[in-house]
Image (cartoon, rainbow, N blue to C red):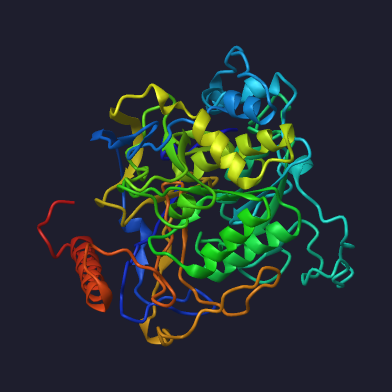
Amino acid sequence: MPINDTSKKLLSHNGLNPHLLSSADTFHTQNEYGLHLNSSSYHQITQQRNSKTTAVKTTNYNSTNGYGLINGASAVARAAGKSTFADVPNLGGNNWGADLVKAPEAWAKGYTGKGVVVAVVDTGVDYNHEDLKNNIWTNTKEIAGNGVDDDGNGYVDDIRGWNFSDSNNNIIDNNGHGTHVSGTIAGQRNNFGVTGIAYDAKIMPVKVLNDAGSGSYNAIANGIYYAVNNGANVINLSLGGNFSNRNLQNAIEYASSKGVVVVMAAGNDGGSQPDYPARYAKNSGIAVGAVDRNNNLADFSNRSGTNQLAYVTAPGVDVYSTVPNNQYASYSGTSMATPHVAGIVALMLSANRNLTSAQVRQIITETAGNNTQAATSSSNTGSIVQPAMSGDKLLPIYAPISNHQILPTTWSFDTNSLPDSNAPVQVSSHNTATNSQTWSEFRYYDNSIGIKSYNSTDEDSPNNGNNGNLGKFLDQLDQIQKQLDEYRRFLGLSNGKI
């Protein structure tokens, strides 16, 4: 039966989110941590969240929701060289997201994503799911199970993709996040479950996050290179972090140079600008914020910011989609908004395979819905599950279990095993994967979070107006202080409001 994660009848893993625990916060291989926290000590509260934001507006771009709600009917029509498609009746029910982005208008004209491959760079995909199994990409140049790299791409038996988290061909999703994203993109149109935005597209599973939802910069970058070099047309990145990394940026720019459109979640911090890699949408790819079914910006969604970039919004509150073991669930987050846009891009490419990445960006931003939107907007996500702790330090991860109980999960962090923070990060070439594993953990964006740390090597870290090394040092001190305050509140050592 369908499962709705907002019912609170699901397992909730809550992980503490350490920003900076030491000056050497890069580490290698497995996520073996030391500071033990038990998620059963956390609880969730449901509340009505409202916010009002005054946006800085430039033409049809503003600093709150960028270019506004993506319009599939206009974008696909423009891609096909036609006038905007006429409205069709809404599907309603769990398909409200498709209605909001006007995907059925494109379907009615025969554009369904057929022939387009969308790489889901995430926690893997349940390729056996009844709503996905017929829409999974397969590597036809590889012979299954013979232990040979038949196509010479550097990966043995990568029949359905590759696992860059564990360096093998097991891309099954034991978390649920990647499967949920995949259903929104290409769930089959079969009169049950969920219908994806591009329901005839193929999903290429690329696993870069472990079962806890965390992964390294290099794993993510290598996953992007793999997707591009093995035929993906669109890449969905429903993940991110707070700092830049040149290795990852190079991979995204490489994808764009090859005509592959990278669609990136803006992040769930409720901040004034997107996280990385979505912030790279200034030059490459598309950043995506989340709205509810009434097209109100979700309060958890990072805004577009004053630096103009290719930022649009899409449904990201209570989105119904596939989860492992032939189940379904409703999740919230910019992770859920991103595959709506990736699906629209797939529809555009099924209408015109000659579009470049730059042309897709231009069409999507020029046809999005902000031409008539007021500069001052009210956002209301309705009743959503929020963490008991304030800010973005603790966010719920939803996963269905049979007895509907909240079970404990232990997280740990061992600062003694951290390597030298000045160790170099190798930048992947355009066609080979790097073996250097700098573990600077990313999180995915379904209002859920894994343990997060930041790589102090080869990054462009944002600052608060300070310059040079002193500015970076002061920024680090500020974040350490904020994290210590969170620990104190968690341990009950502070009378501060939670």
Residue displayed at 59% across by 12% down:
89
* 365 versus 496 height, above or below: above
Using the rendered view, name the quadrant where residue 44 is placed. Answer: top left
* 301 versus 158 height, above or below: above
* Residue 216 shows in the view: no
Foreground pick, 244 / 186: 244
Foreground pick, 87 / 120: 87
Image coords of residue 136 (percent x, y): 75, 46
* Residue 426 shows in the view: yes
Using the rendered view, name the quadrant where residue 458 is placed. Answer: bottom left
Q: Residue at the left extreme?
A: 495
Image coords of residue 391 (percent x, y): 26, 51
Residue displayed at 79% across by 68% down:
153
Residue displayed at 63% across by 27% down:
78
Viewport quadrant of the N terminus:
top right
Image coords of residue 347 (percent x, y): 67, 33
496 with respect to 66 (left or right) = left
345 with respect to 239 (left or right) = right
Residue displayed at 37% across by 28% down:
296
Give the mark count: 0
Foreground pick, 37 / 354: 354
Using the rendered view, name the quadrant where residue 106 is placed. Answer: top right
Q: Residue at the front extreme?
A: 59
437 with respect to 58 (left or right) = right
